[in-house]
Image: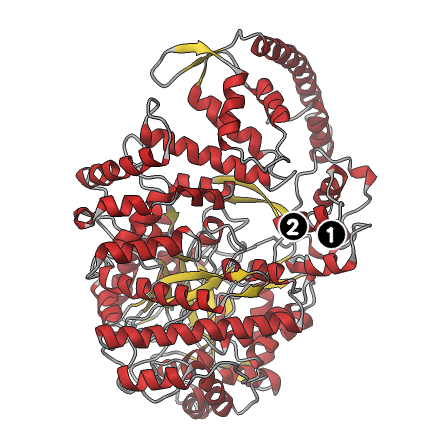
Amino acid sequence: RVPTVEEIQNMVERVLMDGEYVDVAKAYIIYRYEHEKIREKKQEEIIEKAGSGGLTVVKRDGSVVPFSLENIRRRFSYVIEKNETVIDIDGILAQIQREVFDGMTTVDVERTLIMVVRTMIEIDPAYSYLAARLVIAGVNKEILGAKTEMTDQALRDVFKVQIRKAVIDERLDPRLLVFDIDRLAKELDFSRDGQHNYLSAQTLSDRYITRNPETKKPYENIQMFWMRVAMGLALLEKDKTGKAIEFYHIMSQLLYVPSTPTLFHSGTNHAQMSSCYLTSVEDSLDHIFKSISDNAQLSKWSGGIGNDWTNLRGTGALIRGTGVESQGIIPFLKIANDTTMAINRSGRRRGATCAYLETWHWDIEDFLELRKNTGDERRRTPDMNTSNWIPDLFMKRIVSDGDWSLFSPDETPDLHHIYGKEFEEAYIAYEKKGEAGELKLYKKIKAKDLWKKMITMLFETGHPWITWKDPSNIRSPQDHVGVVHNSNLCTEITLNTSADETAVCNLGSINLERHVIDGKLDKEKVASTVRIGMRMLDNVVDLNFYPTKEAKNSNMRHRPIGLGVMGFQNALYKLGITFDSKESISFADTSMELISYHAILSSSQLAKERGSYKTFKGSKWDRNILPLDTLDLLEKERGEEITVSRDSVLDWAPVRESIALYGMRNSNCMSVAPTATISNVSVTSPTIEPMYKNIYVKSNQAGDFTVVNPYLIAELKEKQLWDSEMLNNLKFHDGSIASIAGIPQEIKDKYKEVFEIDMHWLITIAAHRGKWIDQSQSLNIYFRGTSGRELHDVYMHAWKSGLKTTYYLRTLGISQVEKSTVQTQNFGSTHLRQDTAKVANTDVKLCKIEDPDCEACQ
């Protein structure tokens, strides 16, 4: 959009602090003024011409025909549902008249229709679904061709043609032709397209459906896309067609959706369907550069990377082979950072890596500063995430105001591979050796001072994240065959790694919102979805394309998978529960128990059918220790109370009996990933997050999208409070309704935005959910203030609650909704402006909303 003269003038007043460019600015304003006058005159002529039928459009075949508003009106009548009385067709047509020009192509006309409708999404969510149907209709027309009437039967017929065509073009696996494609075509339910809003449909169209790389023409529409994914996941099933149909139905109803790499690659010739890879880097030059090379291969195929760097000796440590001193880990992290940036994952996602380091490592203080935007850029990694891997002993030393010692791993080689009491005993023994002068590299600092620096860097740069070594290991089902040395790119995976094993996470998520029926969670529906989802995830292990032998070795031995959840906030809306309430804690607890129960039981039943994973013997599962039982183990090992109830509502005896009889198919069953992208596709709220804002603009690789909270608008409509004035109020207050007069308090409580919720609620809710999870949760922390003491309290609460990991620290910055259409002087100051003095140097770093490139996990 071209800025108006008034907007340019405002820009000039804000930007020009001296008189150097004033004359140039004034000349430009005069030029724009004249330009606007000419433009307005031309626009009037175009509108007049359009109304009289004088404009022409160029069709796909090159023919030129008159532009007709009546054709556009008929087009809308095709995609508008009868009950959508809120849609103002005349208003849309009037706006289209202003946008069209003579000689426009029909493709551009269709794009204009969508663009006009999407500008109205803020008025009512119905416009979002209308825009989605226009997008879907466009894809369908591309597949069918202009001369074929768009019917369900025509789409079913072309599905059979397109599958064969994509196989011939070497885009899809030839084994897809073995399926009974006629039977699959009959199962395609195109009425389910109506579930998708504009953000969902446009994201699927732009990024997910398979296209010819040269012509960019689609091989599939949305329903065909779901079926293609289902077919790819059923390739090794005995009843391939039957299972593909079963898989299709839970995905196309948005009950369960696999992770983005699975959606990208299922059924293709390179079916790399895993989300993240975890590696440990050994202290040798050969292995360091092998690991960096592996990172490149894993990133190439859409994998996010989590690297454990703690084994590397510290700066100044002796390298015996050359007789020189080591430069430590920082130069190698710089190389890893640059490798990350060089890789474009599958041509659709930017490479993404996270480096982990234990808190006792000699280079920890330099590690904390890797994301600073000042200092020597050769010792900075601006494109790579970082995370602290913290032993419980460090947290205890903070509480007791004790000292903390730093070592180099070449002198303390066992510290990284032990945990709990064993770690504490070895650590104290090394401290004594250091104090006696027996270690070359030994340094003692105050634990609180190091913690303060960690918290400060986290607040200023968003890194390194806070994750905990001991709960991740003590609660791990696989403690008998290795150590969890780090988490993944999004901190929800806690799997063992070694030089020979690259841990692999295969992810998918249950959409809780879709399982709330008539005001309650449908338990039978959840059980059915979990059972099918677990089977799909287990199939990924066998079907997956593994970029490295270490990844294949690990995944085939242990078969870990990560079933997670999304839509938690929207489920609360449907249940009438406020996020910061005891009822919310209870729902998180009981809903996750239900999912955990059926996930573990399903894995055991898969073991009955297919056999247990290779390293089952000796695991916690084999020892009759379930995730809930491990809280007591952590409490005993830590020597401090874990402030989470051990209550359960289900009878777990049948699950324990099944494991005792048949074992487990998967070493790990659950993890809660961010679902940044698949929640968009699934038309639900991301993962376990509260609502970010009730209205905002979301950016990703498919474009910019206005997002409004449909539940809030529905309630305001019910109270007859939704009108243009309320919309302007909502936009002016950046989505918050806390200070808008006339809205009942119960609605304000229910629709609090994330920065209006005390983070202790979010942590407590996560802790009660986490007691059922055998891996971890991708848990963002949202912090409104600037107090270091308050931030300390938040993370101490997370540790004392037994959490294994946290993810980003989100701070509230100056980022507001576009207000060019709002008369701001009518509303006073917004809540964000009142906080400007406090947070002027921080950024809004909301997970995957403000970053259009990073879509790391799901």
Q: Is residue 342 left or right of residue 500?
A: right
Residue occupied by mark 1: 737
Q: CA distance from mark 1 to mark 2?
A: 8 Å
> Which quadrant holds the C terminus?
bottom left
Q: Quadrant of residue 845?
A: bottom right
Describe the element under mark 1 as helix, strand or loop.
loop
> Who is closer to the viewer here, 466 or 325?
466
Which amino acid is tagged 2?
Answer: Asn
> Would you place residue 337 above or below residue 657 in this image?
above
Q: Position of residue 47 (x, y in %)?
A: 61, 13
Image point (51%, 63%), residue name: 369
Q: Would you place residue 62 above or below residue 797 in this image?
A: above
Indicate the colouring scheme: secondary structure
* 808 horizontally vs 744: left or right: left
Three-letter amino acid code at the position of disc 1: Ile
Q: How far across and how far down the image is residue 658, in percent?
A: 32, 83
Tell me whether the residue at label 1 lies in contact with that at label 2, contact meaning CB atoms closer than 8 angstroms. Answer: yes
Residue 485 can be seen in this image: no
Badge 1 local density, few (<14 within 10 Å), some, or many (20+)?
A: many
Q: Which residue is mark 2?
A: 694
Residue 387 picture location, percent across and down = 47, 67
